[in-house]
Image (tube, rainbow, N blue to C red):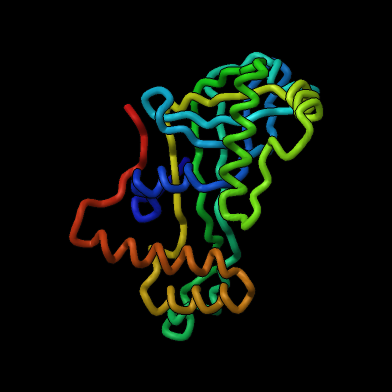
Amino acid sequence: MYTPEHFAVHPDAVQERLARPAAANLVTATPQGILATMLPFVYDPSIGEHGALLGHLARNNPQWSEPVIGEALVIIQGGDAYISPSWYASKAAHGRVVPTWNYSTAHVYGKLAVHDDADWLNRQVRRLTDLHEAGSEQPWTVDDAPERYISGQLRAIVGVELLITRIEAKKKLSQNRPDADVDGVVAGLAARGHAEVAADVARARQEKSAAVSGPCPVRHRPE
């Protein structure tokens, strides 16, 4: 992934992003072509040297049974939004501005393993459910459903585990713009209802300021 230095992500921020509940695209190159599925993952940093992403696919989905050529890829996408040049203070100063797009993303590469085992799947769906129900006043648990029903659901899925080999992460959040332009971007995004991206831009500016006297962020690429 093309990542200019000012859009690079610190490894600590990468770890935080992986641990955050979300869904992502699993992409594999196979003899039948490139296949992709959107699915939720649980990040387990204790597996292997660089951690693993754990998820599951429908048994009827052919992606799990097709041989993977090379590495598999999980694309984790953060908030994104169009950036209007009219938001920049620089527009009034000299006019040399153009539209762009702000976004955050992580490309997680690794070796894909398949788990067609009821016990593994039972543990996985419980971890996934607990992760997403953690903030609920009355969290739903797998045990709330009839055991026979859950057993049938488990037979309809297959587990997947991405053993991470490397990560490429990027935050393109106006870090290359002067503060006055960033102020305009934050205000413009908020006015259009993109509160998440506005907060990301503001946070990126704080991280940039904090890093001025310290080491520059680097790509998280395990050796």
- Answer with the quarter of the image where residue 32 lies: top right
Position in image of residue 2 (x %, y %): 45, 44
- For the view shown, which residue lies furthest in the bottom direction? 92
Is residue 2 visible to the viewer in this orientation of the structure?
A: yes
Residue 18 percent location from the top left of the image: 48, 42
Instruction: Establish if 196 lies above or below 42.
Output: below
Vertical arrangement, residue 110 with respect to residue 76, above or below: above
**Nearer to us in this view, 134 or 92:** 134
User: Is 103 positioned to the left or the right of 47 in the image?
Assistant: right
Callout count: 0
Quadrant for residue 190, please give it: bottom right
Q: Residue furthest left?
A: 213
Question: Which image quadrant: the C terminus?
Answer: top left
Say if residue 61 shows up in the picture.
no
Q: Residue at x 62, y 17 (%)?
A: 115
Residue 33: image x %, image y %? Answer: 70, 22
Looking at the picture, tell me which residue is in the foreground, 208 or 96.
208
Q: Position of residue 194 (x, y in %)?
A: 60, 69
Q: Residue at x 64, y 49 (%)?
A: 139
Residue at 56% over, 77% down: 188
Answer with the quarter of the image where residue 135 lies.
bottom right
- Identified at 56% across, 46% down, the residue is 21
Q: Nearer the viewer, residue 110 or 100?
A: 110
